[in-house]
Amino acid sequence: MKFPRHLLSIGDLSRESATALLDTAAELARISDGQIKKLPTLRGRTVVNLFFEDSTRTRISFETAAKRLSADVINFVAKGSSVSKGESLKDTALTLQAMGADAVIIRHHASGAPQRLADAGWIAGPVINAGDGTHEHPTQALLDAFTIRHHLAKDRGTLDGLEIAIVGDILHSRVARSNIFLLSMLGAKVTVIAPATLLPVGIESWPCSISYDLDDSIEKFDAIMALRIQRERMEQAFFPSEREYSRHYGLNGDRLSRLKSGAILLHPGPMNRGVEIDAKSADSVRSVIVDQVTNGVFVRMAVLYLLLSGSPANLAEEVKG
Ligand code: CP
């Protein structure tokens, strides 16, 4: 089994390596449930969180994941750093490398910034994409797949045949792009549901179906993922009003009552409560939004473990030892 050197997009993974990564995360979740909370795997290694954009979940869960594997963590936040004085990505990276970074986790507003960091060779170790512009957010998709598998396909381990809807601002969503490619690779049937103005050009060639009407088919889905309306990336009006958007595409009590038995609701966070999802839906028994956050730690532990220290076979040895 070959794992990529970097994790920049879902395209870096095969079905086999993505499944092995989810299996490793499941094993780490099982271990974390018991006596052993911390593994010595990455002792002496330094992981850098390099964040040029705001984050709560991703940054904190990567930090928690690295610490549970005994790594040292440097948190670099662009606001308040020498980036404000004009320092380039290259010089920032070279500075962190000089301080001994063994892996860099990067979030950047520019699509392609993690690829540039990996290709330029400014960083010696693995580069992990924690979200770049509107391009990709691979670890979010992996934690979403892990959560769906845990709730709906624990016994069989694949997502074969599951009907999954991704609803809302597909155009600006790196989460949607990574999920469409990962969930379909794992066997799910993905449908994107959005107004035409919030669909990217060329989506017809992506591995998903397209719908403009949530009510048309809501009963058929096993999982529905609501996406945040990304106002900060919108320079024009994409829909008449939030109220109108919510009426057509928001998850609410009425739609909740029409879900298939056992269906689950996901949201990558942060949520605009009352816009893409109302409080009744977000806090309902169908919601697995808090589980997504918990699972993010296990998935990111698996990513760090596999990229920095080799194959899943080593994990069993680690626990035995
Ligand atoms: N889902 C996600 O990426 O959340 P944060 O922006 O809080 O990291």
Image (tube, rainbow, N blue to C red):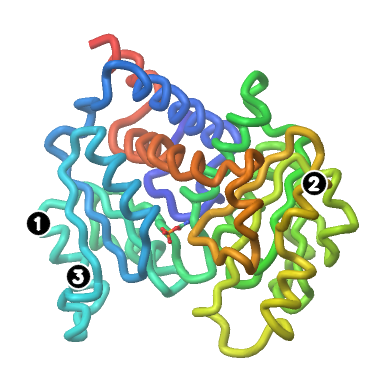
Q: Amino acid at mark 1?
A: Met
Q: Which residue is mark 1?
A: 99
Does 306 sit left or right of 74 as displayed? right
Q: Amino acid at mark 2?
A: Ser
Badge 3 crowding class, 10 Å Cα cut-off, few under 14, some 14 to 19, many 20 or more, is some
The numbered dot on residue 15 is: none
Q: Splitting the image into 4 quarters, where does residue 199 fall?
A: bottom right
Viewer-proximal residue among 258 and 81? 258
Give the mark nearer the N terminus: 3 vs 1. Answer: 3
- The residue sitting at 44% across, 30% down in the picture is 25
> Looking at the picture, how far across and down is residue 67, in whole percent?
22, 39
Q: Do the CB atoms of the residues marked 1 and 2 lie less than 8 Å apart?
A: no
**Residue found at the very far bottom of the displayed protein:** 236
Separation (CA) of disc 2 from disc 3: 51 Å
> Looking at the picture, how far across and down is residue 5, in whole percent?
37, 45
Badge 1 crowding class, 10 Å Cα cut-off, few under 14, some 14 to 19, many 20 or more, is few
Q: Which residue is mark 2?
A: 257
Does 240 sit left or right of 267 as displayed? right
Q: Which residue is mark 3?
A: 92
- The residue sitting at 66% across, 37% down in the picture is 186
- The residue sitting at 37% across, 21% down in the picture is 33
**Residue found at the very far left of the displayed protein:** 99
Q: Secondary structure at mark 3?
A: helix
From the viewer's perspective, is residue 34 above or below residue 105? above
- The residue sitting at 36% across, 70% down in the picture is 53
> Looking at the picture, how far across and down is residue 319, in whole percent?
29, 15
